[in-house]
Amino acid sequence: FVVVTEKLMRALLNAKIEDTKKEVGEPFAGLQSDLWSPKNNTTSYGATRLSLIIKEAGKLMDVCPLLGFDEFTVNSHTGQAIARYLKTLLATANLTIEDSITLPTLDGAGNNKKAFKILKKRMKVCAPHNLQRSIQYGLGRAGKRKNLSIQALIERNARQSKGFNTSVKHSLRLQKAQTSRGIQKRKTKRVFQQHAIRWGGLYRMLRQNRKLESDIKLALTGSRDGVCEESAAFVTAASTHTAATPIEVGTQNDDVDVSDGEDPVHDEDFDSDADQVEANENEGKEYPLQHRCLPAADWKKNNQFESVLTTAYDVSEALQSHS
């Protein structure tokens, strides 16, 4: 039944597309497409739709029929693979990228740009992704002018947050810190880490840090002032670490599967203190992550940074929810 229904729907869709093509002429349709993988990265999916203006019962209607939603079987999301995928999918509806499509709109990933260079077709980066890109430039995390001070502050915040996401003991301490000031257990909050894709996760991390500042300090140091009475273990050879290099938008390889507005984050960026943590745990320290608690100056910068991003976040959320 499912197979028959799918074939029937495909036939009806193709007939409507064909009618529109005959009435309007070519090119006659917009196109949006995206590829993504779940967190376990075991498979990939592709979704592509058309944007059409059709006439129905004497009225013009804006419709966006889904042309395909399938597993993307090619292992690597290269520009060539995406170009082949789109050509093959459009052919199922008797369409071509060259003649049928007016202006494709996708995210600004290098592999998408590469695909349309191969297809010799102009594409447009969608507005939400361009907004993401502008924020990254404004933060000094993209383009030629880097802001290494911002990057270092973000890393210190992320390292602090990661301690709660990788340690049950510290997560429970954070929860207890909240219940000790009258918060019901079911209403306690957890810290956020910046998202591996969007800068909005950075904003949410900063905002949550502000809300939970005293609780975080208590969980990491045993004091709501953030001053630990217990000394950290002595480490003879501190691990070396340099700030992660921000992505250079517009200069990355054309086949890199990262959008212009994206913010690549790697766990190893925030584990530079592994020697200190191990030494603290080996000596049985009660607060082995005390050194991850932000100093007073950084807490102030955290709040200032959040305020700078608030308006951009609100605008971004509004734009994307109505796109």
Image (cartoon, rainbow, N blue to C red):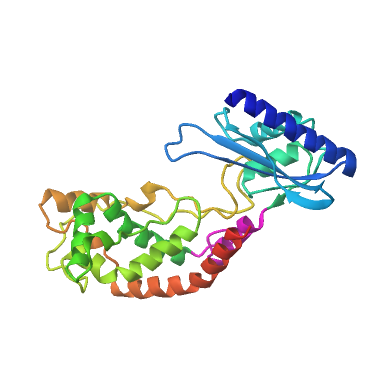
**In terms of image quadrants, where is residue 175?**
bottom left
Please indicate, yes or no, whether residue 204 appears anywhere in the rendered image: yes
171 is within the stretch colored magenta: no
The x and y percentages for residue 295 are 29, 70
The x and y percentages for residue 99 are 84, 38
**In terms of image quadrants, where is residue 68?**
top right
**Which residue is at 22% across, 61% downward?**
185
Image quarter in which the C terminus is found:
bottom right
Of 256 and 43, nearer the camera is 43
**Which residue is at 74% across, 33% downward?**
12
Please indicate, yes or no, whether residue 254 appears anywhere in the rendered image: no
> Where is 30 relative to 46, above or below?
below
So how many labels did they put on this image?
Answer: 0
> Where is 98 relative to 314, above or below?
above
The single residue placed furthest to the left in the displayed view is: 284
The x and y percentages for residue 240 are 33, 52
Of 192 and 225, nearer the camera is 192
Give the residues in magenta. 126-147
**In terms of image quadrants, where is residue 79?**
top right
In the rendered structure, the answer to whether residue 169 lies left or right of residue 254 reads: left
The x and y percentages for residue 216 are 25, 65
Image quarter in which the N terminus is found:
top right
135 is within the stretch colored magenta: yes
Of 318 and 191, nearer the camera is 318
> Where is 162 relative to 23, above or below?
below
In the rendered structure, the answer to whether residue 282 lies left or right of residue 191 reads: left
**Which residue is at 10% across, 52% downward?**
284
